Image (spheres, rainbow, N blue to C red):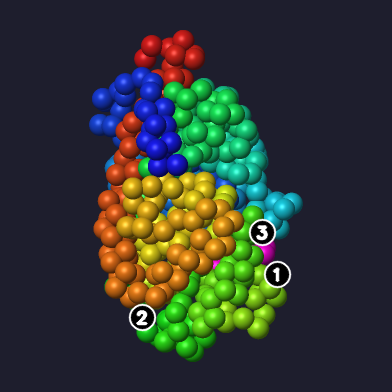
Amino acid sequence: MGQQAAEAQPLLLQGDQVDAEWGCRPHRIVLFVEPSPFAYISGYKNRFQNFIKHLREMGDEVLVVTTHKGAPEEFHGAKVIGSWSFPCPLYQNVPLSLALSPRIFSVVAKFKPDIIHATSPGVMVFGARFIAKMLSVPMVMSYHTHLPASADLTLVPSVAIAEDFETAKVVSANRVRLWNKGVDSESFHPKFRKHEMRIKLSGGEPEKPLIIHVGRFGREKNLDFLKRVMERLPGVRIAFVGDGPYRAELERMFTGMPAVFTGMLQGEELSQAYASGDLFAMPSESETLGQVVLESMASGVPVVAARAGGIPDIIPKDKEGKTSFLFTPGDLDECVRKIEQLLSSKVLRESIGRAAREEMEKCDWRAASKTIRNEHYCTATLYWRKKMGRTN
């Protein structure tokens, strides 16, 4: 996969040269974000909160349209509009919205955006696309199954997704760009390792080896694989940090096993949870990127993850065994072997943890946001101008 990623990278760089003036002036940017980056707990939330923050710091006016539940009136100076929503049929605790009310249209029209950026695994993207067409505004779309062809430019979180798009001919390669990975390396840091948190996560046995998993608990995350892993690791404890529709079933599955479920943790408690484990286990084969992997590595905790989806973008082939470990998806023996290798050597854990931390210090949210604003938004505008037959 590392070689594939290296070969695929040029696909993400084709297209027009950026307009040098674009990055030098403030812009009016509308973000249609679903699920809400203020209520939906995931790496997605961290990505968009940091993105909004850095757009504001670069002087842009930002309007955020999202589902109404938990939406503040403003965030880092960006105005936030909550749209009436309804429960997702598959995940009842995740609200969705078309964002097509006259109120939303009026607010966006009065804002006079330079560009509209929509992201959604739901339905809001349809409303965003309609409004962009009605207002004759260029549109950027973050990865959304089957819909990127309707955008002027599509941002994807990993090379693996770009390769999938090319293979499926979802959108032409020169209209795809990579949203560079980023992590808050101050909020996720080895300094947050706390003995008290380790006591909590280990069920009162802090001296025992401790595996951590943080995330949203969904059936597609392959978390039942961790039960098979734990059955092969006597004396090892595991802590699940997070929540989701699969939590109740997961708790039943781990009944009688050395497992702790903390529920949702936020702020410093979450930082402590990451930093207080011995390793982070990621069995999911469906990650478009894997923000929790970035956060664990930033915390100085090595990762053992399935070599699938966007994870190899974070741990490429030349870094395997140096910054973290990958295993062949579904290969229980290989996964257990690599976990045992880490748990049996504190020296190895600390060495890989330091290397992981150093690697994550290169992944700056501000730089990633600046690339989207100054390059990708500009490219989308150039494509849109060509499509509309405009020269200015």
Residue at 41% in and 69% down: 341
Q: Give the residue pinned by disc 2.
A: 194
**For the view shown, which residue lies furthest in the bottom direction?**
204
Q: Give neighbour class at mark 3: few <14, some 14-19, many 20+ (Cα, 10 Å).
A: some
Q: Earlier in the sequence, mark 3 or mark 1?
A: 3
| Three-letter residue code for mark 1 | Glu
| Residue 189 on image: x %, y % | 32, 67
Q: Give the residue pinned by disc 1.
A: 249
Check disc 1 and report its element: helix, strand or loop. Answer: helix
The vertical placement of 73 against 382, above or below, is below
Check disc 3 and report its element: helix, strand or loop. Answer: helix
Distance between the alpha carbons at the discs numbered 3 and 2: 31 Å
Q: Give neighbour class at mark 1: few <14, some 14-19, many 20+ (Cα, 10 Å).
A: few
- Residue 103 vs residue 9, the one in the foreground: 9
- Report if the CB atoms under discs 3 and 1 are less than 8 Å apart: yes
Q: Quadrant of residue 361?
A: bottom left
The vertical placement of 255 against 285, above or below, is below
- Residue 205 vs residue 304, the one in the foreground: 304
- Residue 64 vs residue 236, the one in the foreground: 236
Q: Give neighbour class at mark 2: few <14, some 14-19, many 20+ (Cα, 10 Å).
A: some
Q: Earlier in the sequence, mark 3 or mark 2?
A: 2
Q: How many marks?
A: 3
The majority secondary structure of the magenta stretch comes to loop
Residue stretch in magenta: 242-246
